[in-house]
Each structure stands twice: as C-alpha cells, then as structure tokens.
C-alpha cells in the first residue's frame, strides 16, 4: 500500500493498494497517524520503519483487530516516505499472508520502494506548484519577464500576457532577446547603468525607466 498525508498532516489517505481486500481498503481510506495506529499510522508518527510480525498480537494493532481481520494478512512492514527535506509525506507498506520479519535484503527493497514513492510524490507536487505559479503570473496585471541567467546576455525565456499588452510586442519579438530592446533614445543612461550593475552583482533593484512600446510610444516602467 501507498498512503500519503492529508492536508491537515494528522491522517493518511490510501493512494494505492489494489491487491488488498476491498473491505480493508475502504476501512483505511482515511487513517489517523499515531503511536498505536497499526503499521502505517505508527511509521508516519515515528518517522521510522515499523515491522509488525503478527497483527493479532502486535500492540500497535490492539485497538484495530477488526482491521487486521479485514486485511486477511498476518504481518505488515511499513516505512515512512520522506521528502528531500526529511519531512514525512506518507508511508509505503508490504503485507504478507504469513507471520514474518524482513531480512536485510528485503528491508533494503522496502526502503528503495519508499524512496521511489517519495520521488514520484515530490515530482507531482512540483508540477502542481509550477502550474499554480504560472496561472498566478499569467493573471497578474503587472508585466513579468523571466530570463536565463546561465546564458550570455540574459535572454528572455518567458513573458506573461500583461507584458505583451503593455508593450505591444509578441512572443516571437521577445523570446531569446535581452530586455534592453525596450530602451530607446530618451532612456536615461545613468538609470540603465544602475539596473545593469545591480543585475551583474545579483542584487535586487528598483528603478523607474523610460521604455518604448513596439509602435514607438514611450511609457514609464516602474521596474523591479
């Protein structure tokens, strides 16, 4: 089974476990985290592997014998699924139809499986966060540019909708160019130099710069 923490961080939600009995899956669809909450709830609470050799006698299952019967299993091995920052994201567990404890090789396999689950969870969370960030940037009334600081001359790699509306430029006009194309004859060279110096020194900067739209009209850019 794979169980992940719910948003409250106080319980686990079953995400995968199709080979377990349906009645058991329904019973543990939402399961509290705590020191005597079976294998997975305890592993998440302690942030360490929990080996339950016999579900009928293990003290962590004392209050959950009805679940033990529903599982139709005799033993359960659970390990915490940890993120890259060490925080518990959930649990990965193996159930067996005989009383047993894992040997070193089996425990290594369990740990590796937990690490793979953590990688998949963090990748999914990153993708979701990036989607939310992109939606927020796209909805902003402020023009936003992102440049690649690893490449020479800091080429633009992203511009939001508001930027195109403010400047009149299109995607093809902007991507791959340094944003100095917004400057023109009346742009103050001292202010432009201040901007360049701060960027070169990797410092935050806030200036008000006279810039030019694609049609040649000027506008004041309150630039961060």
Image (cartoon, rainbow, N blue to C red):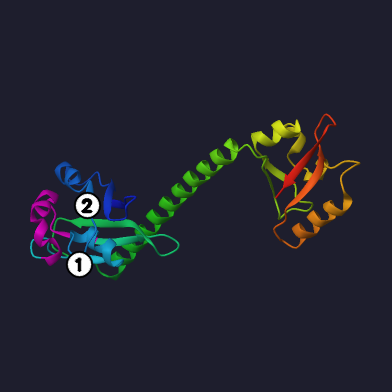
* Element type at mark 1: loop
Q: Nearer the viewer, mark 1 or mark 2?
A: 2
Write down the residue under mark 2: 31
Write down the residue under mark 1: 101
- In the rendered image of this protein, does residue 52 appear above or below residue 135? below
- Name the residue: 12% across, 63% down: 54
Is residue 75 found inside the magenta-colored segment of the image?
Answer: yes
Between the C-alphas of marks 1 and 2, the distance is 23 Å
**With 79 as the anchor, is 64 left or right in this view?**
left
Residue in front for this viewpoint, 192 or 30: 192
User: Mark 1 or mark 2, which has the lower sequence index?
Assistant: 2
Q: Residue furthest bottom?
A: 104
Q: Are marks 1 and 2 in contact (CB under 8 Å)?
A: no
* Element type at mark 2: strand
- In the rendered image of this protein, does residue 38 appear above or below residue 216? below
Q: Is residue 1 visible?
A: no
Write the start and end of the magenta stretch as one range.
Answer: 58-77
- Name the residue: 72% across, 56% down: 205
* Dominant secondary structure (helix, strand or loop) of the stretch shown in magenta: helix
């Amino acid at each position: 089974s794979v169980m992940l923490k719910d948003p409250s961080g106080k319980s686990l939600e079953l995400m995968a476990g199709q080979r377990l009995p349906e009645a058991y899956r329904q019973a543990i669809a939402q399961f509290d985290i705590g020191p005597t909450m079976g294998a997975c709830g305890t592993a998440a609470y302690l942030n360490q592997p929990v080996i339950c050799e016999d579900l009928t006698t293990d003290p962590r299952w004392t209050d959950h014998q009805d679940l033990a019967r529903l599982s139709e299993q005799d033993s359960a091995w659970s390990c915490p699924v940890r993120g890259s920052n060490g925080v518990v994201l959930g649990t990965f567990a193996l159930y067996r139809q005989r009383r047993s404890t894992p040997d070193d090789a089996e425990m290594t396999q369990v740990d590796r499986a937990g690490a793979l689950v953590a990688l998949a969870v963090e990748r999914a969370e990153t993708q979701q966060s990036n989607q939310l960030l992109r939606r927020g940037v796209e909805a902003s009334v402020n023009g936003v540019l992102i440049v690649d600081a690893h490449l020479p001359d800091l080429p633009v790699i992203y511009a939001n909708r508001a930027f195109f509306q403010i400047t009149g430029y299109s995607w093809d006009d902007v991507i791959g160019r340094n944003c100095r194309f917004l400057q023109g004859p009346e742009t103050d060279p001292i202010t432009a130099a201040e901007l360049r110096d701060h960027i070169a020194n990797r410092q935050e900067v806030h200036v008000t710069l006279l810039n030019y739209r694609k049609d040649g009209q000027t506008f004041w850019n309150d630039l961060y």
